[in-house]
Amino acid sequence: MAVYTEVGDEELEAFVAEYDLGTVLSCKGIAEGVENTNYLIHTSVGSYILTLYEKRVAAADLPFFLGLMEHLAGKGIPCPTPVHGRDGQALRRLCGRPAAIVTFLDGMWPRRIRTEHCAGVGAALARLHVAGQDFAISRRNALTVDSWRPLLAASAARAGEVQQGLAAVLGEELDFLETNWPVELPSGICHADLFPDNVFFVGDKLSGLIDFYFACNDFFAYDLAVCLNAWCFERDRSFNITKARAMLSAYRQIRPFSDAELAALPLLARGCALRFLLTRLYDWLNTPAGALVKRKDPLEYLAILQFHQAVAGPGAYGLE
Amino acid sequence: MAVYTEVGDEELEAFVAEYDLGTVLSCKGIAEGVENTNYLIHTSVGSYILTLYEKRVAAADLPFFLGLMEHLAGKGIPCPTPVHGRDGQALRRLCGRPAAIVTFLDGMWPRRIRTEHCAGVGAALARLHVAGQDFAISRRNALTVDSWRPLLAASAARAGEVQQGLAAVLGEELDFLETNWPVELPSGICHADLFPDNVFFVGDKLSGLIDFYFACNDFFAYDLAVCLNAWCFERDRSFNITKARAMLSAYRQIRPFSDAELAALPLLARGCALRFLLTRLYDWLNTPAGALVKRKDPLEYLAILQFHQAVAGPGAYGLE
């Protein structure tokens, strides 16, 4: 939520002159994206987002992220499209950082989630999964099951500051997940972070998917579990089965589930809850007070984890 | 440089529905303005700035600021124009704060000041002074000579942390200024904070003046001294007489100086240097480390003060 790198007017004009985007009319640093610096620029041709990639995004991954957005946009997924310079390059450097210009997407992310939003997200995620199937590059998920043990170890000693006995609870869950994690399920390109603030709507119509900087190859049903957790729990931490049913039904109209995927959904939802719990816990314990980034409550995801631990099967998510 | 108040999509849609601005297409919090929260919004009609006034702006002053921008814009000054709702009101409330929508201005503020910029600012300031003459409301300058003694008192005890002996130097200067400050000079509406980040250019052409939240009634020549100090000193703190000549000449082609104004210019420039030195000193000593707002170096203005203390007369600014 910050502008980490300030780009001057002359640097920007010289940078944009490498593209066929006309002349720069304005440039505003925007409070969007936790990891990178983003500017909304108006040129004589249109509106664009200029992103400067700060340290937390690995430069080696950028061709994957930008190539993926371009691939998906080419298949009609409403995601930002990287703009190529006159030399053909989409990934350039500005102010000592890797930088790219992408198309601007209309829309706002919904603060109060309605069932229509969940249906829209389910359908868009299925389309994304289908569209990604012939993307040539792959990237392993750096935050899947094999990363959770070291992540827990990094926070275990201080986890009790957040809730007494938390480390033991998480350790037990991790034992279970490591033993039972599926080895083979339909997989491919996943967004892996499709939270409400990464999905834009104009009215009830989904208009944009953004922030592909956690995208990776993993089980499709895991990506769906991310959305289930992010969109279908209310603020009081109760599960809204109507929203879940709308999301899953919309998804499977476009990409039908296999029996194995359906059966694995509660387990994947537990794993996904643990994954966000662990990164939030780490950030909670390691973000200095007064930092630019707002910390997110790890215990929200403990409640979600406990919900999925208790379900009898995928029917609990509203599927017949 | 921060979004202090987050406005949700539904709150925004309801707010914009009070205007004839079409439907909201997007809304981005922008890192602009130290005092307020600003959003750049795109609607089906155009681009606008939505400002939520945070605590540091007195609500009682808002009718003056908004009325002034509307008055000046009506006279052709390129400043933001407040947009009226269908009920005729420009000043409304949003998220518990006073809020207004103004027109969006193209342009970027210049990081590397060139003589052409200084000439543009001089001319624009003179036009602003002329255009403000029949504005009906007035507002006293809360940061002129009579406010400096209490401001110094608030920092004196710790001023030595910034530079040894600073409080004594400032006290002596203040004695001099209080004794010699003019009582009568041509006066009227002043911007009073026309620093480079408040002036937009597209190419070499001045396209916008923003941030009228220090505007007040004061000596016109004092407002010019603010610009002289803000635009005509180089980063090494040397004075660029070519830039000053360009600024003052452009100004007086539109609004000629009286002899008294010319004679007072060195004194006003000293006073203006002290004013920014004192507020920067206060902020320097009272801004917590890690705050969202970047502190500005008070000693930059000590160098400017010392330059003006040493000049023989207004000829030092490039005027014959």
Image (spheres, coloured by chain):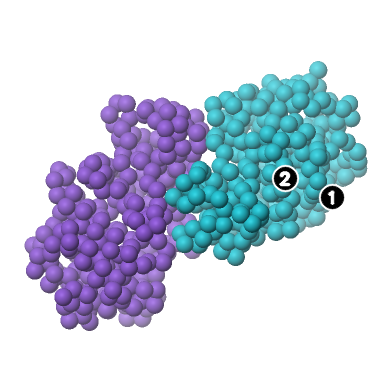
Chain colours: A cyan, B purple
Disc 2 secondary structure class: helix
> Residue B56's x, y, as percent?
34, 50
The tag earlier along the polypeptide, 1 or 2, is 2
Q: Label 2 belongs to which residue?
A: A68
Image quadrant of residue A169?
Answer: top right
Decide which of B121, B197 is in the foreground and name it.
B121
- Chain bearing mark 2: A
Question: Which residue occupies 22% across, 63% down?
Answer: B250
Using the rendered image, report if marks 1 and 2 lie on a common chain: yes
Disc 1 secondary structure class: helix
Question: Which residue occupies 17% across, 61% down?
Answer: B253
Q: Which circle, 1 or 2, is nearer the viewer?
A: 2
Side of A128 where B105 appears, left or right = left
The quadrant the C terminus of chain A occupies is top right
Question: Which residue occupies 31% across, 76% down?
Answer: B239
Side of B210 where B181 appears, left or right = left
